[in-house]
Image (cartoon, coloured by chain):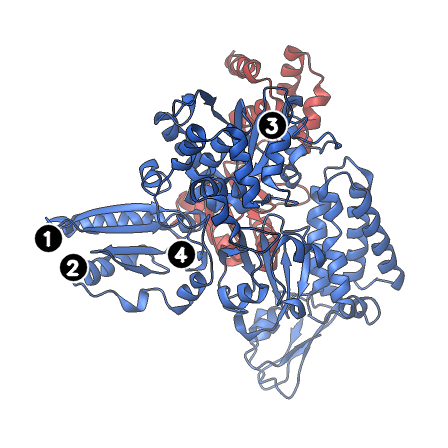
Amino acid sequence: MIRENVLNKLLSEYRSRENLILLLQRIQETFGYISDENVDWFAEKLDIPASKFFGVITFYPKFRMKPQGKNTLTVCCGAACHIKGSDKIMDKAREILALSGDEDTAKDMSFTLQKATCIGACSIAPVVILNKQVHSDMDAVKVSKLIKGYEREDFLGYL
Amino acid sequence: MSNETITIKVCLGTSGNASGGEEVMRQFKRHFLEQEIEARMERRCSYSKVGCRGFCSKDVLVDVIVDNERTTYQNVTPIMVERIVKDHIIGNTPVAEWTVKDDYAAFHEKQYKVVLGPCGDIDPESIDDYIKMNGYRAARKALTNMIPGEVIEAVMLSGLRGRGGSGFSTGEKWGICRNELRTPRYIVCNVGEVNRPLAEGNPHAIIEGLLIGGYAISAAKGYIYIRERYHLSVERLWTAIEQAREKGFFGKNIFGSGFDFDIEFSFGTEAFICGEETALMESIEGKRAMPRVRPPFPAQRGLWGQPTVVNNAETLSNIPLIIGKGAAWYSSIGTDESKGTKVFTLSGKVRNNGLVEIPMGMPLREIVFGIGGGIGGDKALKAVQVGGPSGGLVPATMIDMGLDYESLRKVGSIVGSGGMVVFDEDDCIVSVVKFYMEFLQRESCGKCTPCRLGTKRMLELLTKITEGRGEDNDIKILDRLSSVMASTSLCGLGRTAPNPFITSYNHFRDEYLAHIREKKCPAGVCTALISFEVISDKCKACGLCRRACPAEAIAGAPKQVHVIDRKKCIKCGACYKACKFKAIKKG
């Protein structure tokens, strides 16, 4: 039971700090998202109601309850990025990844698309973050190059 | 070999990284190696990565220092490196067309860099660089020569006020916390989005401030609360703490003073409400970040019910300077009520976007037109939003006001975290306010009714107005909601949430009325209220607009004036942008 081992390790980590957010962050790091099964498992072991877990999970936009794509593309939609057209970047990215409704992950699991409030890089707005790399001065054309380039060769030179 | 060295300093903050700074650095190293620069020039070469120096639109910025002479290059890309090495280093002739221009000097000249001073000069990943510029000397002085009461008094005398939110006196806050006799006590440093360049450019200043603050209130432990997403800031702070710990600046019996102190990271997740100190503490405790009712204040009952001080990273970065150079020196900067400097992120429609540090009280005009270089594209300034989403809009007519806590409060704005977004004539004020309200509504934690429902209702009404369904009565309702929210919300976020509306309605009433009564958007932004039309005597029938239109709403043939079908038009503005003859009218 590999999953059981991993969960037990997280459980012992939790016991040293007793911090629910830390535990949830670790679960998400490990599995990419927080599944109902994992919540139930911890709720039972720790004798904390599952509702308390869900309360914290749904409060913070960062926590996911659905699987995450291989790459994460974050579009900053703070004020500075907004007036420089971040909504058009968002629309383009959604179009390329064929996302509809409240979907945030492409069907082939290649990308998850997220929205950030402000990442504090206002002077190089609008920005998008691909995995950990921040890309400055973006627009719809550049973002589509970014996504397609990444899909094609998993590598991208600086634009 | 000569004593003089050749030093290359590459800006590697968030923006420098985003613009390809790492690769530029690699290229410099490669070319130096290939050209055998060290042997050929008989000079030792050193490379350092430096933090953000503020002028991010010119990134990657590179300093080339040969025999103490510094040349700064702007917008450096990896392919430019070879020529810089050949012409400048070997040929001794700097590549003039790539060096920084007058705007770089103008951008920096008017600033007063106290906190940001070392950013962009020292290597943020080297504690020795920091120690060389007197780093940790203030901490040593405080811990070995001063009793905690004296430290608090010095900070109080300096007049330093919190840089994150309401501007409460830092010394007073420490004093209140120290007077609570219960132990353990805690000190928390909040690293917000505006503090990122600080954490990336000079992380040791923050943790030295935290150490001094910890000593002043005799804290058992310090916490750095930072969003997980700020990878580079986290890494640099982490490195800084490890290095400081190795030197014995953290841990047991620091500087032989008998004081034990260490720092722990607390990784927050992105939520605007976490900037509110009681919500931040809930988050550190692993709960939903909802503000607590006060009193009791955090200094009395904070983290886990213990006396706690929460300071912003910029506030703490000032502390080593105050202790090191003295309270009198510090209080000589700024105005009567607001001492010291403040860092602002200048963004939006100004020519020079970037991070700026100014003495408190500097007129807004000097920031926008002096440091910022004015509005791009010869447009007219319309307003400046100061203090982030819950700040207020300062109209162009009031641009001569000074920036300090009191003046900003008078015009219905706040210093806040130091966000500054400049809007020009092309921006629609109603739509800007709606944007801020969208943000505030989404980020409202939902604990108290005035904020939870107030932001929702205000957003609905503002949306209605931008979509051309506004009525006169909407303004009255917005007004009432604003005053209820401002006076009855639980925390500062709810109380300041109506600021953008209140200030903008005071100064841009005409624009609201145009939307409501004439169903027109004067700036031509709100899509429901604008239409596009071909001006027939200007149209050259070139077909550019027809091809640009994604909705195939433009009909026309060669030598025939084009026509836009309003039923098909999606108002995207593609034709307006495509037309080279200004033959398309928006309005």
| Chain B colour as displayed | blue
Which residue is depicted at the point 56% across and 64% down? Answer: B349
Answer yes or no: are tags 4 and 3 on the same subunit. yes
Q: Which residue is mark 4?
A: B59
Residue B291 lies, in percent from the top left, at 71, 34
Which chain does the numbered disc 2 sit on?
Answer: B
Dot 1 and dot 2 residues touching (CB under 8 Å): yes
Task: Give the left or right position of residue B503, taking residue A103 as reference.
Answer: right
Per the model, the C-alpha gap separating discs 3 and 2 is: 60 Å
Residue B104 lies, in percent from the top left, at 40, 64
- What amino acid is at disc 1? Arg
Residue A50 lies, in percent from the top left, at 70, 19
- What amino acid is at disc 3? Arg
Dot 2 and dot 4 residues touching (CB under 8 Å): no
Q: Judge by depth and name the residue closer to the eye, B448 or B387.
A: B387
Q: Please report whichever mark, 4 or 3, sits nearer to the chain's N-terminal start.
A: 4
The residue tagged with tag 3: helix, strand or loop?
helix
Q: Which mark is residue B40?
A: 1
Per the model, the C-alpha gap separating discs 1 and 4 is: 30 Å
Q: Is residue A102 above or below residue A138?
A: above
Q: Which mark is residue B178?
A: 3
Q: Judge by depth and name the residue closer to the eye, B281 or B456.
A: B281
Q: Which residue is mark 2?
A: B90
The quarter of the picture where the C terminus of chain B appears is bottom right
| Chain A colour as displayed | red
